[in-house]
Every structure is written in structure tokens, then in C-alpha cells.
């Protein structure tokens, strides 16, 4: 069976003593490879390599660093089909979705190609007599990223592209459930001209995460995953004096106003709720129709549209979505469906018990729809992360705003309406980090930044865009004086002023 190894100092490195974990093919429900799980020693080795490489890399001028990103972009594009197939084989998402995963990461690589401009500091000429002031952005040194299973290309690229372009060395700890694509990306970066050691990939579980969080030479850690772990990682890393940004779970709502274009909204909701089997932090697993008439009209359109969805293997070009990632995750989603029934929600379409012919052991779930879900239900409050859509009926738009704002998560939200004033008020009032107006999955483009509120995000700088540059650099301000006559300047013993 194939072994997925760490990638340190420019090469794949096997650690025969390491623990191993199976990597599954979710379409078949069978192990297809094993990933080596590292320990503190492997992290030490990666950091030692990164420390040496980073010094030289930071001294490379920004335009040359950008050229490596341009080459990396070209290589990702040239290898798109291979990367997408590899990604789909471990994650289970359909190929078109795997391409989307890589493409959204590629957008951030393109953003990082502009790093010379992004790193420009500020300058004040003549802040005082013969005094000039300038600021510069300098890399932090060795930084790390810990990523989830659901976007094995996009999220590593969100982090490593800006971090490396800014002159840092990066240690990536990808999800142990689909670890192959991050290693391929590291190889492509070396092919693009990145010096060995600037990007190291270390596989593992909590043992490696803790070693990263405790390592004194790692200056910042970016994390994306579930909220309890995000909060833990944030706390432990911050206690060790590191700069931290930790994105967590989500439960995003789509509010359907009575004046919405319902056909368009239903089409948008289907993709946002069931695409990627609901395993997206920007999925839309809750719809909130405003008014009973809207709810009935929405439900009537949703049911046949959901029943027409096709669940299939990753390579099925007609399939809308594939299996979920693991047997354990499938069982967890089924438990939530049962919990919804027990809590008194109306199970309109039950996706349990679905089997795909020829793939009976695969982790497939048909789409599930609940109606009459209420905010006090645990199945509403918690993230299910599967192909399960819940309808929560409200009477007014204000009730919708208050309910969404009260929810423990605040990643994304969408409103569907034709009323500009209502949309504007909604966007201003809602306590959520990313808002879509007739846009079901409002993931910001690469030159804005991505981040949720409340238990969806810990830390104050978001992913990519200018926040990414800020996260991976620190600002230094230089105040300089060059007296005209070159003579001795009268030094005062009070705090200097610019008078
Ligand atoms: P996860 O929290 O299980 O794992 C994320 C990372 O943490 C992995 O690298 C994993 O190895 C590591 N990890 C797991 N258990 C750990 C522990 N006890 N201590 C330390 N590290 C540990 O998340 P997942 O299941 O891989 O991904 C799905 C979750 O990620 C969902 O909750 C989803 O909403 C969230 N997510 C959030 C965003 C966002 O930007 N807000 C984006 C994508 C996914």
C-alpha cells in the first residue's frame, strides 16, 4: 500500500518508526494508502530546516519571490487534472468541485504574485527638521498552518502562498484524512524554484499539533478546523506567545424574503446546502423563509428539486455530490438526523440508508430535508457538516436577523431579496463575518479577506487578502535624522518632539 510521507528540506522523507494511519477512498469505503503520523522530533527537524532556509529566502528580493509564485501558478494549472483526481480520491468530492477547491486556492497564489506591491511600506518626508519616517513589513520567520480535511488544496494555499511570498518559511500540517495533495503542492513549489526548506509538510494528529504550538521557533500559527479545536489551538499557541488566527466551525443561514426570486433562490440553496455533501464551512444548511406563504412556496419547490439530485462517485460527471469523508463522519450525520426526529422536527426527506450500486461500502448519504426546525433544537444549534438542510420558519425579517445574530457561529449568511433597502439593513445589522446578498456562498475574493465571527473565528486577522499579509509580517517604523551640517545636534533629555 502507498505510504504518504512528510516533505522536509525539499524531499519526501520516510520515518519508519512513526505511527501510521489509513487514508481511505470514501467512494469505496476502503483504505488506499497510509500516512505517517509525526511527533515532536519530526517537527524539530522541519523547523531546523525551515530556520536555515528562511534567512536566505527573506533576503531574496520581493520581485524574485513573486516570480516563484508565478511559476507555481503555472505548474498548478498544468497539473490541475492530476491534482483534482488525487484530491477527489481521498476527499470524495466530485471532480468539478475538486477543481473548484484548487482554483480558489490558486486565486490566492495569484494575489501573492503581487507581493512587491503589498509589502511596500509608508514614508513621511520631513516629519521634523532633517527627519524622515518610514515603515516596512518584515517576515516573522518560521510560521505554521494546520488545516482541515474539507479543502485540502484551497486552505493550505490560503496560508502558505502569502506566508512564503512575504519571506517566511512555512510548516504545513495538513489533515491526516486527505494528506496527498499538500505534498504534491510542496513538490510543485520546489519545481517552481522555491529553495528547499522554505516549505515543509509534516503529517500527524494532536501530537504534531501540540509540538507546533509549543515550538519556540515557530512565530505564528494559522489554524482552520472545528471550533472546539480552534479554541484550544488558539489558547495554547497564544499562551506560548505566538501570533494566532484560528477559524472554526459554522452554521450558515439563508434568509428568504417574501419578494425573493424563489426559483433562483432554490437553485442557489441546492448547491450551497448539498454541494460537496455539505462539507463546507460556507455551506448553507439552514434556510429561513420569512412568512408562512414564503415557507410553503419554498418547500413546494425544494422537495422535487432535492429528489432530483444525483449522488455519485467522484468521477461521475453527472453527480451533484459524492460521499462524505469517512465512516465515522457518516455515522455522526445519521445520528444528527435521528436527533432531529427525536427533537420533533419534521423529517421531510430522509437521506439515510442510501446505497450506490457497486459502491455499497462507500460513505454515501442521500440529501435530507427537515422542516419546522426551531432555534432551541440541538440539531439547529450545532454544525452537522453533511447533506442535511433545515427549514426554520420566522414571521418577520427582524426575527430572522435576531435569530441568526444569536447563533453561536457567525461565519457566513445570505439574504435573498429584491429589496435593496432591506438587504442593506440586513448586511449592516447581522452579527456574521461574511454576508451574501443574493449570493449563497459569499466567500470573499482573494484580494479581500476571509473570516467569521463568534465561535467561527478566534483571533483578529483573517485569511488571505491584506489581512494575510498583515498576519505574516510585522511592521517596523524607522525614524531617521540626517542633519544638514553634519555637526552635533543638541540632544534634549525630554521626550523628542517634532517642533
Ligand atoms: P478538525 O478540527 O477535526 O481538524 C482540523 C485540524 O486539527 C486537522 O489538521 C487535525 O489533524 C487537527 N486536530 C484534530 N484533532 C485535534 C486535537 N484534538 N488537537 C489538536 N489538533 C487536532 O476539522 P475537520 O473535521 O478536518 O474539518 C471540518 C471542520 O473545519 C468543520 O467544523 C468546518 O466548519 C471547519 N472549517 C472551517 C473553515 C473556516 O474557515 N471557518 C473552513 C473549512 C473548514
Image (cartoon, helix red, strand yellow):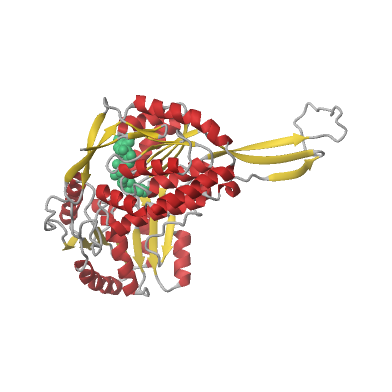
Which quadrant, please, contains the N terminus?
A: top left
Instruction: State ligand 1's quadrant.
Output: top left
Judge by depth and name the residue closer to the eye, 170 or 415: 170
Q: Quadrant of the C terminus?
A: top right
Q: Residue 387, image x and y in percent?
A: 24, 57
Q: How many numbered discs?
A: 0
| Left or right position of 437 against 476 | left
The image position of residue 23, as x and y in percent, is 23, 41
Q: Residue 296 location, x and y as percent? A: 25, 73
State whether residue 374 is above or below residue 260. Answer: above
Residue 42's image quarter? top left
Viewer-closest of 193 and 477: 193
Residue 434 figure quarter:
bottom left
Q: Quadrant of residue 266?
A: bottom left
Q: Is residue 346 above or below residue 166?
A: below
In the displayed structure, would residue 207 be above or below residue 285? above
Q: Residue at horizontal 22%, vertical 60%? A: 316
Q: Residue 355: x, y in percent?
A: 12, 57
Q: Is residue 394 visible?
A: no
Indicate whether 249 appears above or below 39.
below
Q: Is residue 111 visible?
A: yes
Residue lying at 88% horizontally and 33% vertically, measured from the top left: 485
Amino acid at each position: 500500500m502507498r505510504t504518504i510521507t512528510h516533505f522536509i528540506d525539499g524531499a519526501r522523507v520516510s520515518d519508519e518508526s512513526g505511527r501510521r494511519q489509513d487514508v481511505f477512498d470514501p467512494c469505496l469505503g476502503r483504505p488506499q494508502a497510509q500516512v505517517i503520523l509525526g511527533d515532536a522530533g519530526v517537527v524539530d527537524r522541519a523547523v531546523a530546516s525551515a530556520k536555515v532556509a528562511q534567512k536566505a529566502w527573506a533576503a531574496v528580493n520581493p520581485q524574485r519571490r513573486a516570480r516563484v509564485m508565478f511559476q507555481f501558478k503555472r505548474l498548478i494549472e498544468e497539473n490541475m487534472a492530476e491534482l483534482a483526481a488525487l484530491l477527489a480520491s481521498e476527499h470524495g468530492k466530485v471532480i468539478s468541485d475538486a477543481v473548484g477547491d484548487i482554483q480558489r486556492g490558486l486565486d490566492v497564489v495569484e494575489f501573492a504574485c503581487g507581493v512587491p506591491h503589498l509589502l511596500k511600506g509608508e514614508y513621511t518626508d520631513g516629519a521634523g527638521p532633517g527627519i524622515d519616517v518610514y515603515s516596512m513589513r518584515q517576515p516573522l520567520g518560521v510560521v505554521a498552518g494546520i488545516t482541515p480535511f474539507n479543502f485540502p488544496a484551497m486552505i493550505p494555499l490560503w496560508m502558505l502562498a502569502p506566508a512564503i511570498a512575504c519571506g517566511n518559511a512555512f510548516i504545513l500540517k495538513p489533515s491526516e484524512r486527505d494528506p496527498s495533495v499538500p505534498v504534491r503542492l510542496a513538490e510543485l513549489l520546489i519545481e517552481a524554484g522555491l529553495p528547499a526548506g522554505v516549505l515543509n509538510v509534516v503529517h500527524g494528529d494532536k501530537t504534531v499539533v501540540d509540538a507546533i504550538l509549543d515550538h519556540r521557533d515557530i512565530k505564528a500559527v494559522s489554524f482552520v478546523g472545528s471550533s472546539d479545536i480552534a479554541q484550544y489551538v488558539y489558547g495554547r499557541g497564544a499562551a506560548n506567545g505566538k501570533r494566532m488566527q484560528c477559524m472554526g466551525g459554522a452554521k450558515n443561514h439563508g434568509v428568504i424574503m417574501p419578494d425573493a426570486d424563489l426559483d433562483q433562490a432554490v437553485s442557489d440553496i441546492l448547491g450551497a446546502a448539498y454541494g460537496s455533501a455539505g462539507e463546507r464551512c460556507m455551506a448553507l444548511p439552514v434556510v429561513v423563509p420569512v412568512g408562512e406563504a414564503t415557507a410553503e412556496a419554498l418547500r413546494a419547490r425544494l422537495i422535487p428539486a432535492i429528489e432530483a439530485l444525483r449522488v455519485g462517485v467522484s468521477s461521475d460527471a453527472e453527480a451533484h455530490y459524492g460521499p462524505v469523508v469517512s465512516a465515522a463522519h457518516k455515522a455522526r450525520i445519521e445520528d444528527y438526523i435521528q436527533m432531529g426526529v427525536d427533537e420533533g422536527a419534521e423529517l421531510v426527506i430522509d437521506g439515510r440508508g442510501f446505497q450506490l450500486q457497486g459502491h455499497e461500502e462507500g460513505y454515501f448519504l442521500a440529501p435530507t430535508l427537515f422542516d419546522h426546525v426551531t432555534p432551541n433544537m440541538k440539531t439547529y444549534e450545532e454544525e452537522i457538516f453533511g447533506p442535511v438542510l433545515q427549514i426554520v420558519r420566522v414571521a418577520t425579517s427582524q426575527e430572522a436577523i435576531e435569530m441568526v445574530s444569536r447563533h453561536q457561529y457567525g461565519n457566513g449568511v445570505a439574504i435573498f431579496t429584491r429589496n435593496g433597502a432591506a438587504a442593506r439593513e440586513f448586511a449592516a445589522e447581522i452579527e456574521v463575518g461574511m454576508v451574501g446578498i443574493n449570493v449563497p456562498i459569499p466567500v470573499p475574493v482573494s484580494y479581500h479577506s476571509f473570516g467569521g465571527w463568534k465561535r467561527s473565528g478566534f483571533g483578529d486577522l483573517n485569511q488571505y487578502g491584506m489581512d494575510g499579509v498583515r498576519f505574516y509580517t510585522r511592521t517596523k517604523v524607522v525614524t531617521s535624522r540626517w542633519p544638514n551640517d553634519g555637526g552635533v545636534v543638541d540632544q534634549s533629555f525630554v521626550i523628542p518632539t517634532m517642533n
